[in-house]
């Protein structure tokens, strides 16, 4: 391994699906084009990496309890997704992927932390965006789209950092100067990016 290419953190034990993952280390690998990949495989010679994380990642509190599925879906909210995404200047497939992961298209979804609606707006974020009723689909979708655009602008168009900020808060991204080493956030980014690509490929939202 070439000197100067390794960024070492502290090893951690990951909690996966409620059980400990013995002997597995999660690596953050930075590609030559600046993109970041999280993987359990050992880094190859010449790859820039660091070990996740500085502290134990948080247990995932993912949408499985609300019936989250990776299956692509048509939704009654597709026209609103398209409209709000265009208003915010974003790809409607990205917004649909966020909605899919955040709420599984349930406009009444409420998280244990109090996030509300299709794009799971926290109360303070909804107030900041002027969203009076976070459970009203159009207000939620357009507010959430504007907020994601704000995060993209804040982090110079870096989609991974913007998604991390949407999930964990911009303060966490700034604190780590990178994607926070939270299991939930890492899973969230993976799922949104995967679904974004698949919705683009399948053209499930007419535009």
Image (tube, rainbow, N blue to C red):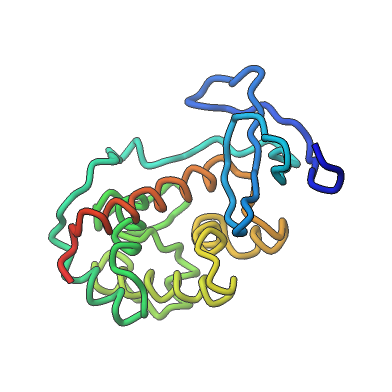
Which of 199 and 118 lies nearest the eye of the viewer? 199
> With respect to residue 17, does 191 lie above or below?
below
Q: Residue 54 is drawn in which quadrant?
A: top right
Q: Is residue 61 left or right of residue 35?
A: left
Q: Is residue 67 left or right of residue 169?
A: left
Percent across and percent down for residue 91 are 33, 70
> With respect to residue 113, does 46 lie above or below?
above
Which residue is drawn at the image coordinates 16% and 56% (left, top)? 75
User: Considering the image in quadrants, where does the C terminus appear?
Assistant: bottom left
User: Considering the image in quadrants, where does the N terminus appear?
Assistant: top right
What number of labels is visible?
0
Q: Is residue 18 left or right of residue 91?
A: right
Which residue is drawn at the image coordinates 62% and 53% (left, top)? 179
| Residue furthest top as drawn | 22
Percent across and percent down for residue 32 are 63, 55
Which residue is drawn at the image coordinates 55% and 35% (left, top)? 59
């Amino acid at each position: 391994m070439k000197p100067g290419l390794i960024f070492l953190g502290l090893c951690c034990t990951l909690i996966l699906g409620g059980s400990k993952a013995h002997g597995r280390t999660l690596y953050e690998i930075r590609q030559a084009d600046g993109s970041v990949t999280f993987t359990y495989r050992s880094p190859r010679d010449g790859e820039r990496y660091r070990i996740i994380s500085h502290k134990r990642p948080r247990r995932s509190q993912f949408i499985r309890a609300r019936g989250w599925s990776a299956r692509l879906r048509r939704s009654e909210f597709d026209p609103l997704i398209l409209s709000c995404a265009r208003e915010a200047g974003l790809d409607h497939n990205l917004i649909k992927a966020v909605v899919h992961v955040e709420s599984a298209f349930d406009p009444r979804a409420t998280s244990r932390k109090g996030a509300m609606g299709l794009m799971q707006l926290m109360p303070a974020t909804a107030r900041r965006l002027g969203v009076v009723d976070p459970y009203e689909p159009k207000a939620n979708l357009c507010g959430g789209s504007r907020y994601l655009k704000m995060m993209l602008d804040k982090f110079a168009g870096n989609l991974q950092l913007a998604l991390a900020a949407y999930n964990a808060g911009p303060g966490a991204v700034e604190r780590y100067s990178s994607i926070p080493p939270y299991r939930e956030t890492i899973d969230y980014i993976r799922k949104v990016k995967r679904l974004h690509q698949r919705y683009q490929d399948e053209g499930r939202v007419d535009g």
